[in-house]
Amino acid sequence: MMLKDKLLAESSNSIEDYALRFACNVEPRLIEEAQKGRTEYCVSIDTEDKPIFTSPIFINILNELLGGVKAELVQLPTNSLFSYIKNSYLKLSWGDDSQ
């Protein structure tokens, strides 16, 4: 096996492990939000974790693990003079768009 293949496999395994831990930790928070009548929850993505959170592997695994909760990345503008600066968020939603 080439070094590149080993590195890609290691990266993929790390992202899968992180997604599993994240899903277990966020589930109670989603329940709390649902009890408040909300149908979505946004998690701010900091720079350190951005490569993991923005990985298609992470998003796909979260969508599988959270059974019906839709995980997606969103970009929202910051409250600054520079409207082109945006913050990244992981949006977890479980309601219809009509709600």
Image: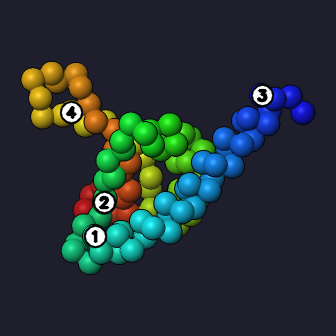
State which tag comes first along the sequence, 3 or 1: 3
Could you say whether the residue bearing mark 3 is in a helix, strand or loop?
helix
Real-space CA distance between mark 2 and mark 3, rounded to the nearest whole angstrom: 38 Å
68 displayed left or right of 61: left
Point out residue 86 in the picture as x, y percentages from the top left corner: 26, 31
Confirm or deny contact between disc 1 and disc 2 (CB under 8 A). yes
Could you say whether the residue bearing mark 1 is in a helix, strand or loop?
helix
Q: Amino acid at mark 1?
A: Glu
Could you say whether the residue bearing mark 2 is in a helix, strand or loop?
strand
In this rendering, the count of numbered labels is 4
Point out residue 34 in the picture as x, y percentages from the top left corner: 29, 73
Q: Amino acid at mark 3?
A: Lys
Real-space CA distance between mark 4 and mark 2, rounded to the nearest whole angstrom: 19 Å
Real-space CA distance between mark 3 and mark 1, rounded to the nearest whole angstrom: 42 Å
- Residue at the spot of label 2: 40
Real-space CA distance between mark 1 and mark 2, rounded to the nearest whole angstrom: 8 Å
State which tag comes first along the sequence, 2 or 3: 3
**Is residue 19 shown above or below 79?**
below
